[in-house]
Image: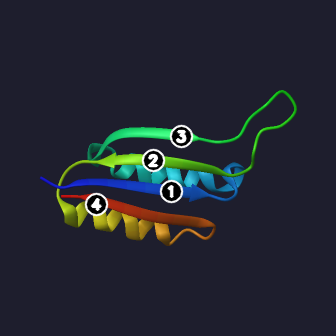
């Protein structure tokens, strides 16, 4: 069974997060694990972030989700596939 991990870099979290979240909700049954990372300290919260998704389900659905995410300006998607 393939393990597919998607890495999603969001360059402007404040404006792009709602669009990204809409896609995450649309494909929610295909997301097994979700981990969000962004830089934060006492003085600032980074405007960019990284989300790692462990995917589940049919590869065609995962590819559709990847395509939908890539269609959003300012979003970069990279995929890791473990066989």
Mark nearer the viewer, 4 or 1: 4
Q: In the current view of this chain or complex, which residue is farthest to the top?
A: 42
Whether pointer 1 and pointer 2 mark residues with C-beta atoms closer than 8 Å, the reply is yes
First in sequence: mark 4 or mark 1?
A: 1
Check disc 1 and report the residue beneath it: 8
Crowding near pointer 2: few (<14 within 10 Å), some, many (20+)? some
Q: In the current view of this chain or complex, which residue is farthest to the right?
A: 43
Secondary element at tag 3: strand
Compare residues 45 and 16 and report the one nearer the observer: 45
Q: Residue at x 74, y 49 (%)?
A: 47
Q: Is residue 38 left or right of residue 22?
A: right
Determine the image quadrant of residue 40: top right
Task: Estimate the spatial distance between the alpha carbons at disc 2 and disc 4, rounded to whole Å.
Answer: 13 Å
Crowding near pointer 4: few (<14 within 10 Å), some, many (20+)? few
Compare residues 57 and 18 and report the one nearer the observer: 57
Q: Residue at x 39, y 70 (%)?
A: 67
Task: Estimate the spatial distance between the alpha carbons at disc 1 and disc 2, rounded to whole Å.
Answer: 6 Å
Compare residues 65 and 79 and report the one nearer the observer: 79
Q: Residue at x 57, y 57 (%)?
A: 9
């Amino acid at each position: 069974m393939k393990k597919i991990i998607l890495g999603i870099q969001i360059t402007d979290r404040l404006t792009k997060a709602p669009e990204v979240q809409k896609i995450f909700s649309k494909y929610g049954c295909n997301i097994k694990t979700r981990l969000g990372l962004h830089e934060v300290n006492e003085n600032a919260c980074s405007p960019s972030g990284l989300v790692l998704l462990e995917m589940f389900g049919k590869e065609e659905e995962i590819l559709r989700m990847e395509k939908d995410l890539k269609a959003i300006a300012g979003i970069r998607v990279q995929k890791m596939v473990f066989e």
